[in-house]
Amino acid sequence: MIRMKKLLAKVLASVLIFSCVGCGDSSGKESAAEDNEALTVIGFSQPGAESAWRVALTDSVQEAFSEDRGYKLIYKDGQSKQDNQIRDIRTFIQQGVDYIILSPIVESGWDTVLSEAKQAGIPVIICDRNVVVSNESLYTAFVGSDFKSEGEKAVAYLQEMYEADEAGNLPEVNIVHIQGTIGSSAQIGRSNALIKACEDNSNWHIIVEECGEFTKAKAREIMDNTLQEINSDSIDVLYCENDEMAMGAIAALNEAGIAYGNENDITVISFDGSVGALQLCQNGQIDLVVECNPLQGPYLLNIVEMLNSNKTVPKITYVDEKYFAKDDLSEEYIKSRKY
Ligand code: AHR
């Protein structure tokens, strides 16, 4: 259906261009419009621009769906509101885009708008975070992170760090947990891994748990308040669900003159792997950074190209992700990172 529409547009465009040769129009307007018609149009809905990570995702998608490759990308920023994202998807449907790429702010609440896209015959590819819908046929494919596995990597690191001593005594582990946007896959996967570990290890205790909305400012505020309410000596782990929030919490610790990181009593865990966080990790200020890979453009391009060729696409594609402690990092490697 989409291929037919594209083919028709391309044929029409070349016929018009051909019939225009020598007709003396110097404006070039018609052929520009015709070229545009021949492009595959993608509507891309992002939840916001709350982190360096998200900006890197936007850049990666824009780079992949370039005009040179035959695409026109319409980008919309939902300003951190699901309602805005729903409105943006409805606009894409009205515009008759060929594909919609949705990075959903939270998992639930998408059934109605995805049904509308399905009815309009527009394939939706979910990226970054996932959705929970009543019927999985409401979207064509998911490309993004395995947040459960990310959380498990962080927990495995802590498990090793706080193992029993030779006499079999387990240390008490008090955790400050700064969460991402509640209800987002990134928060759910990373939080659930920690919560499960606390259920499995009776010596692990979450002493503070608050939502920092994935932003530096909010996390800094949470940490400032925490340091006023509890003695920093009682904190063993600072578990921040992204780099921005780790940097915000670290700023509060710096201001209060409290030591943390590799050589000190507060173990800092972060997620994403932005250049700034990896530098802090190399300095020994963050103990572990679990990577969340925003370079998803090429994966999405691959799915769209498969769909364009009428190929069956995988329902789920997880992007490659690693984790980093101080010894895994070098200056050259950090410099080579794209985000
Ligand atoms: O969904 C991915 C998360 O969202 C990243 O960890 C975070 O930085 C972003 O805001």
Image (spheres, rainbow, N blue to C red):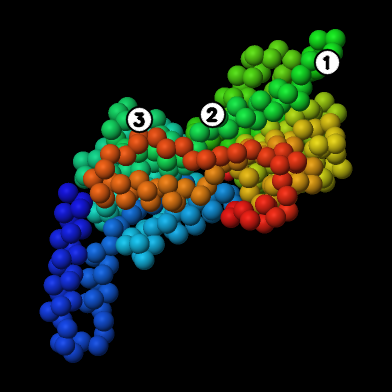
Mark 2 vs mark 3: which is more N-terminal? 3
How many circles with numbers are drawn on the protein? 3
Q: Disc 1 designates what residue?
A: 165
- Whichever of labels 1 and 3 marks the residue nearer the N terminus, that label is 3
Left or right of 167? Residue 6 is left
Of helix, strand and loop, which one carries label 3? Answer: loop
Disc 2 residue lies near ligand 1 with CB under 8 A = no
Label 1 crowding class (10 Å Cα cut-off): few <14, some 14-19, many 20+?
A: few
- Outermost residue, bottom direction? 24
Q: Residue 81 location, x and y as percent?
A: 46, 45
Task: Name the amino acid type tagged 1.
Answer: Asp
Label 1, label 3: how many angstroms apart (C-alpha)? 46 Å
Residue located at (18% from left, 89% from top): 24
- Which SS class for mark 1? loop
Which kind of residue does numbered mark 2 sit on?
Lys
Task: Please name the amino acid that badge 3 sits on.
Answer: Val
Name the residue carrying label 3: 133
What residue did someone put label 2 on? Answer: 148
Q: Position of residue 138 (x, y in %)?
A: 29, 35
